[in-house]
Each structure stands twice: as structure tokens, then as C-alpha cells.
Image (cartoon, coloured by chain):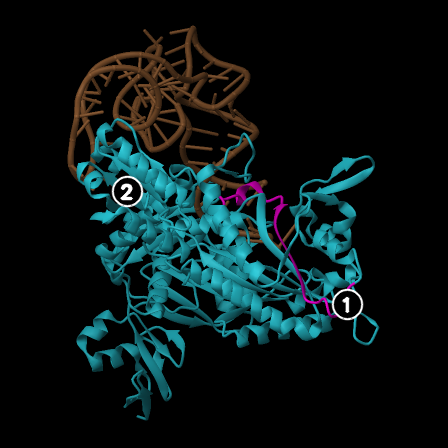
Chain colours: A cyan, B brown
Amino acid sequence: MNKIKITFPDGNTKEFEQGVTGLQIAESISKGLAKEALAVEVNGEIRDLSRAITSDSSIKILKWADDGGKYAYWHSSAHLMAAATEELFPGVKFGIGPPVETGYYYDLDLGEHTLVAEDLQKIEDRMRELAAKDDPYIREEKPWEDAVAYFKKKGDQYKLELLEELKGQTISFYHSGKFTDLCYGPHIPSTGRIKAIKLLSVAGAYWRGNEKNKMLQRIYGATFPTQKELDEYLFRLEEAKRRDHRKLGQELELFLLTPKVGGGLPLWLPKGTIVRESLEGFLKEEQRKRGYKPVVTPHIGNINLYKTSGHYPYYKDSQFTPLKVENEEYLLKPMNCPHHFQIYAAKPHSYRDLPIRLSEFGTVYRYEQSGELNGLIRVRSFTVDDSHMFVRQDQLKGELCDVIDLIQLVFSTLGFKDFKTRLSFRDPKNKEKYGGEDQMWEMSEKDIKEAADLMKLNYYIAIGEAAFYGPKIDFMVRDALGRTWQLGTVQVDYVMPQRFDLEYTGADGQKHRPVVIHRAPFGSMERFMGVLIEHFAGEFPLWLAPIQAVVLPITDVHLEYAKQVFKEFEASGVRVELDDRNEKIGYKIRDWETKKVAYMLVVGDKEKENGTVAVRQHKKGDLGQIKKEAFLAQVLNTIKTKSLTL
RNA sequence: GCUGAAGUAGCUCAGCGGUAGAGCAGCGGUUUCGUAAACCGCAGGUCGUGGGUUCAAAUCCCACCUUCAGCUCCA
């Protein structure tokens, strides 16, 4: 028997018989490891522990703690769920059933039957029974024709459709108990590893993600090796709901969404407006320092603007119906750029004037499908912290870097660390979706990539995510429920300057075309606020907090001193309130604590006598007496420095 | 837009064929109090909208609207 060399993650190597399995290797290391092992990574590919390794390889035994281990675990869980479903609903047809970030799903065609909560419970119970049997997951390879014959007999058109794309290849199947599925794998050793099971939800999902196809029923599930981990996961889900910006927005009176105004048309309440305007003020000041020129433009514009820009033909479906006025048609503006281009085009420009950076918090209107609306995160009316920068080709990269720097400043000021940077390029296979010449695209994608490298962005490239007029750098963040959203964006545009015939006169006396950078650090004030509320769980840093401090007199006797403290803070620009209600101090504290107010200044006899305030900090409690002037100075400093901590 | 679930007082929710309920919030009074809920009282609802079944509908049926989850879409 030949020997092969196995290299472990720590660099150590060891010889094994050719055909050794991952499980045997794990067993040779320790019993504990073999018991915990779920799959094995062989030269970067995740495989079943039971598959033979036939040549020299680098391997890593995957446990629950490894992403690859979870992947296999949830993949196998999807099979377990399918197995349980097939026993309860004979004749069910299966779409796809992959693992996802936390858990797995399977798409099912149950014919006329619609799954209800009781069905999920039954499936879940059956999954537990099947898991208890501890059936091994067994891989089997078949010729393509045999695979087709199998599913023809079973009458599963979905699997047959999938097989069409694998024509001529050897097809792998996995068996567990009585259940058999077409599957690449890999899988964990046996169903018994799946200990804690919870089916979360059922929802519709189009077959192959195409809305023209039949809608299947998708069951989402979670499984874990221990009940404790499942409980923790479910607890985290509940916690996330507490952070939900829609809930906090209502509780903290930040904004209002009412069908009386319309879906996706948020109303900003006084407290929410303070937060929003604080963000705007911050960015306006940074932009002023960087040579941006503020402009203001109307909310509608002649439709010809958008025909020129190309928005109208490309995005007709996501715009509100045009308004007819005196034989002209107007559009609620879906973007600010055409307006800004008119400002640029209104007078001739010299190469010396460039770059010109026009900026506006411009509100735009987009028709989003009703099912897409989501709190502040997906709306029909939103304000873009927009800027259009008209630059010479030789200035482009430098400007891109400056913009990235500004976005990084915005994100770091707010403590956003968990974001991803995406370079959104066009899909060369789908050119009709985009405007402009190939050469422009190649140039701008190169510029974007070089700027991203220069600024040391940790990015990934997404093909097909570009705007129709150019590639983008998008800054992606997650909401409380783990969904990813695009916030800030930087876009390079060679297309629209051409469409609008924008020019400047160069040093050579000739006309030249500027390049436009579209950029928005927040992206949309609405979406950003939504994410921000969840990011801080409603506990804003002091500079953003709608109420920064509240003065709480113990009794009426202390009201006069309380007023004095209140007025001193107010005069210094602190957003302070005075709670002169006839209530016990405990009641007031509870009340303001639930409103997540940072500082409560309790004043009674002692404070009045000493010229102090008894500071109570949100979630932390009594900090004791502090001289009122000293505390005011501290508060002002915390605000001024935009500190993330109190 | 599609599939499913849900809409009862400002908020959280109970009631699920027999004249609309609670707690909190609000208002009036009593209480003047030291770090997360004092006490008494008052007021508040075309039970999402419209239609139907029934002697009788918040409750059963149908349609629509809105919200939520997922899908699709997202300049």
C-alpha cells in the first residue's frame, strides 16, 4: 500500500496509507477530535470525513467552531428537514436546500398544501426522531443517466432541471435513512450530531430566484450541537428585535410611518430630527473644510432631464408616474445629478476651476414595490447626502481617495466597524444594462480599484452591481436582523458628462469633458438613521442625543435650584430638560431611564447647598455629586469631541 | 409585485358568536418624597375598511387596505 503525506494546519506532516479517511486521521490524533469532527477540508475543499484521501494533501479537521464545520452541519440539517418533510408529506418535490449564514433552508413544492405552524411543529418533531436514529450520511456517485432516471421515476422536475446543467458529469447523491437527495455534499457523519432543532419560519420563494417561475415554500431552520447554543441563538434573535429601529423609533419618538401619509414616506418627529440634523451638520462642516459648495434644487424636474440622463429609460419602473403641467411632463426627482449638472453647465468652466464639488442634502423619490418597504431602511422618499464632483481626468484618483477618506472619517466617528466595502463592477456579459463605451468602463473600474488599493480598503468585487453609468465603491452594513444594506457610495461616471455635454476649457484652449464623481457618505439619511438607531440600540452618543441631560428636583422645595441648573445648561447649548412633575424621584428616574437619556441630574438639599448635581448616568447609575460647573464643562467636552462614550 | 402571517384605546396585549376589557401613558385630585413604577378618581375604541352569513359578528365567510417575514427588485 502506498503512503501519502498529510500536512496539518500547524505545518506538521504525517504519513498515512493512501485512501485514509478524514475520520481515521482525526481518530489518530485524538478520540475527542474524532467525536467532534464534522467534516474535513482537503486542499481548501470541504469534504465528508468518510471520503478517501488519495494523494498528498493539506488538511484541516473541521469542528463546529469552524465555518466549514457549520456549513456541513447546516447542510446536513437541511437534508434532515427534507427527510422529515418527505415522511410527513409523501410526494413532496424539492427545490434547493442550502446552508446559510445562520442555519439553512429548503424550498419545497407541496402542491396544493400550504404549510401552517402546526406543520412546522410536526416536521420539527419528526426531525428529532430521525436525528435520534443517528443515520449515517452516505455518499454515492452515479452516472448522469442513472441520476436522471431516478428523478424521472420520482417525478421531481426541479431536480431534473438542476441535472440538465450537470449533463455528462458524475452525479453525487447522499442517503440518510430512507431519504435520498441529489447533492454535492459535504455532509457530517450522521444525523445524530444534530441535537437541538428549531424551525423558524416559512415563506414563499421563487424557483431559481426568478419571479416568472413557480413560487415554492421555503422553510428556514436552525440547528445546534447543544440546546444551550440554540437557546442562546433564539435569545439573540429576541435581543435583535429589541434593537429594531422601527420599534425604537416609535418608543423614542424619533419618526413616524403612517398609511395616512403613505407607505415608505417617513415623518421626522422633533427628537429624530435633532439626531438627523446633528449628522447633517457634522457632514456639512466636514465638506465645508474640504471645499464643497452647497446648492439647493427643487424636488421635481422636467422629464427631459431624465431622458437625457438616461434614468427615465433605464429605471422607468422605479419612478413615480410623471406629473403633467401645461403640456410639459415633470418627474419627482429620482436622483439629484441632473439638477446639479445644470448648475455646472450654466456657465463655462476653466480647467483651473476644477474640481468643482456641488453638494446638497437632496430628497429623492423612488417607487419601491410595496413588499419592499421596510421602516426607514427601504423607503419611497429619502434624502441623499449627495455631491457631484466635476474633475479632470488627472484629478480623478486623488479626488476618489479624498472621498474615501471622508467616508472613513464618517464611519469611524460613529464607531461603525462592522462594514464591508464592495467594488461594484458591471457584468460584461450583460452590456445592454449599462451605458457608455467599453473603454470608459475599463478605465473607471481601473481607477476605482487603484483608489481602493491606495486607501487600503479591504474590499471584495461584485460583478453586475454597477450603476448603469459607472462602477461604484459601496459601503455595506448590517441591520439588527443581520440583513446587509448599502449605505455610503462613491461612483465614477464618464457617461453622464457626455449625455449632458459637460465641458471645460483646458490649458490648451480646447474643450474637454470632465469626469463626474457621485458620492454620498451616509447614502440616504433615512437608511443611515435606521442603521444608526440599531447600531446604538437607541443610546446615541451625547452629540447626537435628542436629550442630553434632564434635571430632576427631589421635591418642589428644590425647584428653584433645579431651574437654575437647567438654565445654565440650556444657556451653554446643552439639550436639557427639567422634570418638574409632581412625582417621586424613583418614578422620574425609571421614566428617563426607559427613554435612554444619558444624564439625570438629581438635585435636593445637599446639591443646593453645595452647588452640585448628583449625576446619574444611563445604565450605570449614581455617580455621586459633582460641582455643576465642572459637570457642565465635562458634558460640553463630550459633545464637542463627538465622543462615543459618556 | 408574489407567498404566508397579523391588524382590538396613544403603547403592550386579553376577549374569538350574546350589550367592548386590563396594565401603562393622558387628564383631575391627594401625596412633597434621595436613585428603575405612591394612592384615589376620570376620560379614552365606527374592534383596519367594505360587503356577506346570523335573531345577534371584534369573533364565521369574501374582497380590499396596511404592517411584518421571506422572495423578486433596489439609481
Please say whether residue A372 is one of the residues in the magenta stretch.
Answer: yes
Give the amino acid at mark 1.
Ser
Q: Which mark is residue A600?
A: 2
How far apart, in angstroms, are the residues tagged by discs 1 and 2?
57 Å
User: Is residue A202 or residue A88 the one in the foreground?
Assistant: A202
User: Is residue A210 or residue A127 the one in the foreground?
Assistant: A210
**Residue at image location 78% in from the left, 35% down from the top:** A325
Quadrant of the rendered structure where residue A381 is? top right
Give the amino acid at mark 2.
Met
Quick check: A500 above or below A354? above
Residue B7 on image: x %, y %: 42, 28
Quadrant in which the C terminus of chain A appears: bottom left
Residue A621 on image: x %, y %: 22, 47
Count of numbered marks: 2
* Residue A28 shown left or right of residue A545 in the figure: left
Residue interval drawn in magenta: A349-376
Please say whether residue A68 is one of the residues in the magenta stretch.
Answer: no
Mark 1 nearby-residue class (10 Å; few <14, some 14–19, many ≥20) = some
Q: Which residue is mark 1?
A: A350
Q: For numbered disc 1, what is the local secondary structure? A: loop
Q: Earlier in the sequence, mark 1 or mark 2?
A: 1
Quadrant in which the N terminus of chain A appears: bottom left
Residue A263 on image: x %, y %: 55, 37
